Image (tube, grey):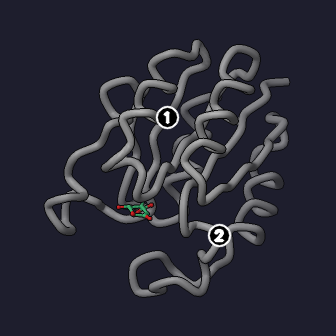
Amino acid sequence: MKNIIIINGPNLNLLGKREPDIYGSQSFDSFFETLQGDFPQFKLDYFQSNIEGELIDKLHEVGFSYDGIILNAAAYTHTSVGIGDAVKGISTPVIEVHISNTYSREEFRHHSFISPNAGGVILGFGLQSYSLALQSFL
Ligand code: DQA
């Protein structure tokens, strides 16, 4: 059974409450339960942190043993050389995910330090972006 982890960055713990017009009104915990039901062929883990170093530590921890990583680094996507380097330095394939279409938003969201080293990028499909990323591991 493939072991896949979803790693969410800062402010994504507020999903459901945060800017629902952009991010929807469902909490990630409730969406994660649905995902587990939809993909019984995967052992799914979930990690969220608002702290850049904790996200890097988690990437190092899982990045040589897991079969896949789905990463929404949130705002750190656009700022963090460190998370970009971590993605480059590990061997587990990383799919970069965003809930919103970052290219239809402010210009500072158009650049990603993750994308050059990601196996693929999925964005703009709401929470379904995570389901599409999981499908890529089927
Ligand atoms: C986000 C997009 C980022 O620009 C933003 O900072 C987020 C969420 C998304 O999933 O759409 O926090 O990664």
| Residue 113 quadrant | top left
Q: Is residue 88 left or right of residue 63?
A: left
- Say above or below: 14 vs 68: below
Q: Secondary structure at mark 2?
A: helix
- The type of residue carrying mark 2 is Asn
Q: Residue furthest left?
A: 107
Residue 15 versus residue 81: which sits nearer the camera?
81
Q: Residue at x 51, y 15 (%)?
A: 89
Residue 117 versus residue 37: which sits nearer the camera?
117
Q: Secondary structure at mark 1?
A: strand
Whole-percent x and y of residue 127?
54, 63
Whole-percent x and y of residue 12?
57, 66
- Say above or below: 12 vs 72: below
Residue indicated by mark 2: 13
Whole-percent x and y of residue 83?
47, 35
Q: Residue at x 69, y 14 (%)?
A: 64
Total numbered circles: 2
Residue 95 tag number: 1
Q: Earlier in the sequence, mark 2 or mark 1?
A: 2
* Quadrant in which ligand 1 is drawn: bottom left
- The type of residue carrying mark 1 is Ile
Q: CA distance from mark 2 to mark 1?
A: 20 Å
